[in-house]
Image: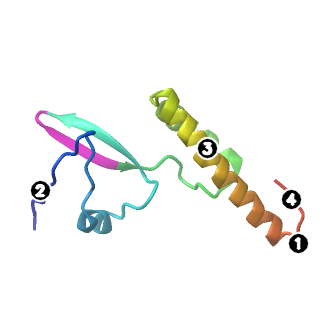
Amino acid sequence: MRKTIYKILGKRGRITIPWEIRKELGFSYNDVVSFEVDGCSVIVKREKLCTDCNGSASDSKDNSPVLKELLDELTPEELRTALIHLSIRWAEYTKSLSKENGGYDHV
């Protein structure tokens, strides 16, 4: 069954994907989404940047063009924000590895 949900576009061009849709389609925090214009409609898709984000470095080489394309489209301010976010995530990740390895960093 197809259901229409109406949202109001905010002053800065922002909308929230309704919770019902996020739940049904599996959208979650920090997912990457793409926007495609199709006539007078916009198609929003969740994008998968890698097939195994927790896998080995060799796995991610196949997906680097997608990530590079995404990064190339960001403004300098968006790149700065992404770098800060990734730096924090990396620090948290290495800290958790350190705890798992008895205090030794092997990253």
Which mark is nearer the camera, 4 or 3?
Answer: 3
Disc 2 on helix, strand or loop?
Answer: loop
Residue found at x 44% / y 59%: 29
Which of the labelled discs sits on residue 105, or is there none?
A: 4
Amino acid, disc 1: Gly
Q: Which residue is mark 3?
A: 84
The local crowd at label 3, few if under 14, some if 14 to 19, many if 20 or more residues have their Cα within 10 Å, is few
**Range drawn in magenta:** 39-45
| Magenta stretch: dominant secondary structure | strand
Which of the labelled discs sits on residue 62, or is there none?
A: none
Q: Which residue is mark 1?
A: 102
User: Would you say 27 lies left or right of 1 here?
Assistant: right
Is residue 43 covered in magenta?
Answer: yes
Is residue 68 covered in magenta?
Answer: no
Q: Nearer the viewer, residue 56 or 98?
A: 98
- Distance CA(mark 3)–CA(mark 2): 34 Å
User: Would you say 77 lies left or right of 16 here?
Assistant: right
Amino acid, disc 3: Ile
Which mark is nearer the camera, 2 or 1?
Answer: 2
Disc 3 on helix, strand or loop?
Answer: helix
Q: Which residue is mark 2?
A: 6
